Amino acid sequence: MKTLNKFFRLFFLTLGAFIGYHMARHGLPIIYDGEFVAVAVTRQTLMYAIVIGGLIGFLGSPFLVRWIAGIINFILSHLHKLPFLDVVAGTIGAVSGLLVAFLLTMTFPEDVPILGDFLPVIISLLCGYLGMALLVKKKEDLFNLLSFTDQRAKDDGERSQEERLAPKILDTSVIIDGRIFDICQSGFIEGDLIVPGFVLEEIQHIADSADLLKRNRGRRGLDILNRMQKELPVKVRIVHKDYPEISEVDSRIVQLAKDLRGKVLTNDYNLNKVCELQGVKVLNINELANAVKPVVLPGEEMAVQVIKDGKEAGQGVAYLDDGTMIVVDGGRRYIGDTIDVLVTSVLQTAAGRMIFAKPKNAADQGVDAKASY
């Protein structure tokens, strides 16, 4: 600290001596007989001016240092309260405004009366302030322009970090369903999981229901939430933000997703459609399950176990490991047996996918009969 004080004293001593020398070189005005008269420039006058200027700078340095430090602290205390983007935009705007002011003052004549010496300073202050205020107000447009390349990359399919880490709002159906736990545990979901307080209340009401099935589903949902908070790598938060003016739980979920700029996680078909209509992004667990099912094409062979009758006469029903229903034409007589079947067609519906097949031996017999014919 002492070294810094010595530096400032030496700096202001040198500055004062330079100012005294500069003033003496241009003639020091004194009052003589009521009029200003310039003192002749001599070597002795220059020495006196340098000594007096340096002495004033040396003695006044403590006051000047405190005054400058006060101004700097005042500016920094206000800058700390401003967002970083505002500071950057303001700096760019001020520099741009000063550059415009410099170009303007170059075109002005030198002999402007009265304001000739002050006009460049006034124009610089005005242009600097206008540039700073304009760019602070238009900072979003400025940074969008600067990040034009990144924006194009995003439009080409690259999701930004904010998009990937957007909070996911869970509804009642997806919590009770339970598959969300396994999906999150596998690492396919990024960002915080948000459980609205009114959804948690709805699950608690279901858990307290007099109906045994509803009570079991509600308790399963509470158990799933408990495991998610303790075991998942992602953060699970309960947000107690309610909308008393909105009666429907689904509408509250949509409004919360808008406020948090998040996505809705659900397997409710109706909520899915409401989100799409209101411009809220939705992740449907059922759609994910359908997307990851193995692709089966007509003509492929597979081994299945026929477990029950079908709706039509002679049909048998089997299931794949992922729950896809297989309707086996003429498979009723094979109930309880594992047989090879040949896929004849695949039907994709809103509820899922159905596969139609027939026993392979029957298909082979049909082909042999056509060949012999």
Image (cartoon, grey):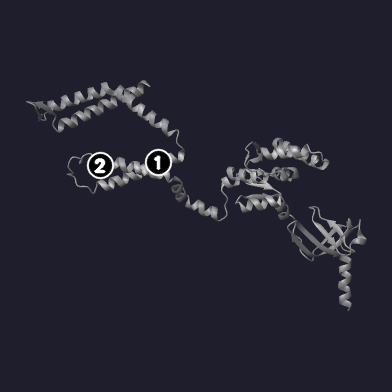
Q: Amino acid at mark 2?
A: Pro
Residue 71 percent across, percent down from the top left: 35, 29
Residue 229 appears in which quarter of the rendering? Answer: top right
Q: Residue at left 22%, top 47%?
A: 108
Q: Mark 2 vs mark 1: which is more N-terminal?
A: 1
Residue 200 percent across, percent down from the top left: 70, 38
Q: Quadrant of the N terminus?
A: top left
Q: Residue at left 62%, top 50%?
A: 281
In the figure, 19 relative to 277: above or below? above
Q: Where does label 2 land, which residue? A: 120
Residue lying furthest bottom: 373
Instruction: Pick the residue in front: 215 or 119.
Output: 215
Classify mark 2: residues with Cα within 10 Å, few (<14), some (14-19) or many (20+).
some
Point out which mark residue 90 bears.
Answer: 1
Q: Amino acid at mark 1?
A: Gly
Q: Residue at left 36%, top 42%?
A: 94
Residue 373 percent across, percent down from the top left: 88, 79
Instruction: Pick the residue in front: 226 or 339.
Output: 226
Residue lying furthest left: 33
Residue 202 percent across, percent down from the top left: 72, 40
Instruction: Pick the residue in front: 342 or 17.
Output: 342
Residue 188 in view (yes/no) = no
